[in-house]
Amino acid sequence: MNVKLNDNVLVISGKYAGKTGKVIATSPKSGTVTVEGVNIHKKAKKARKANEVSQITEIPAPLDASNVMVICPACGKAVRVKHSVVDGKKVRVCPKDGCGATLDSAYAGKAGKAAKKTEEPKKRVRKRAAKAETAETAAPENTEDKAE
């Protein structure tokens, strides 16, 4: 299955053909994906306690994965997914007739990795260690004064 969680996809067949949305759930065993705002079904929810109210809720139902195409974030086109090896990992890529951009956000580019390293917070330093060092340096000075 070439569709992953949080991908933007275009529905290409069925009642919702032409609609786009974000993938909110995938099921590789059954070959289905759930797309936000597409294939909405109504379900009755019965009140289980005295203070609850019965209601009709709308939930997105799964679609077959073959009925959706991934939208490339770089060129904005619905594309078939091509696989390529980048840094020893197999990644999804926009095909040759497209822009050639990586569809997996983890391997989008080395510039993104450098930005993550600079954004990391500084490591915390224990204050106790600094106090202990000052106490140790102060103690020997006092003993020397007493010896003289």
Image (spheres, helix red, strand yellow):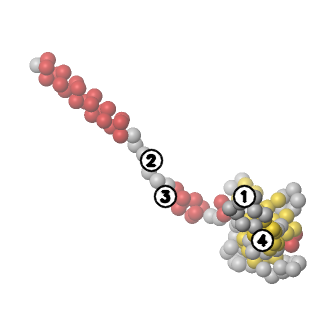
- The residues tagged by marks 3 and 1 sit, at their Cα atoms, a distance apart of 51 Å
* Res. 44 visible in picture: yes
Q: Would you say the residues marked 3 and 2 are in contact, meaning their CB atoms lie under 8 Å apart?
A: no
Q: CA distance from mark 4 to mark 2?
A: 50 Å
Picture layout, residue 147 above or below residue 5: above
Give the residue displayed 13% in from the left and 23% down from the top.
145
- Mark 1, mark 4: which one is toward the viewer? 1
Q: Position of residue 36 (x, y in %)?
A: 74, 71
* Disc 4 versus disc 3: nearer the observer: 4
Which tag, 2 or 1, sits closer to the chain's start? 1
Regarding residue 60, the answer to whether it shows in the image is no
Q: Residue furthest left?
A: 148
Residue under pointer 1: 49
For marks 4 and 2, give the one nearer the viewer: 4
Judged left or right of residue 80, residue 148 is left
Q: Position of residue 130 (x, y in %)?
A: 33, 37
CA–CA distance between discs 1 and 4? 16 Å
Query: Callout 3, which amino acid?
Result: Thr
Q: Residue at x 36, y 35 (%)?
A: 129
Q: Which comes sooner in the sequence, label 3 or label 1?
A: 1
Residue pointed to by mark 3 = 118
Q: Residue furthest front?
A: 50
Residue to which mark 2 is pinned: 123
Say what amino acid the circle numbered 1 marks: Lys
**If you read the primary sequence from the N terminus, does the residue marked by circle 3 or circle 2 appear first?**
3
Q: Which residue is mark 4?
A: 56
Q: CA gap, disc 4 to disc 3?
A: 48 Å
Give the Cα distance between marks 2 and 1.
49 Å
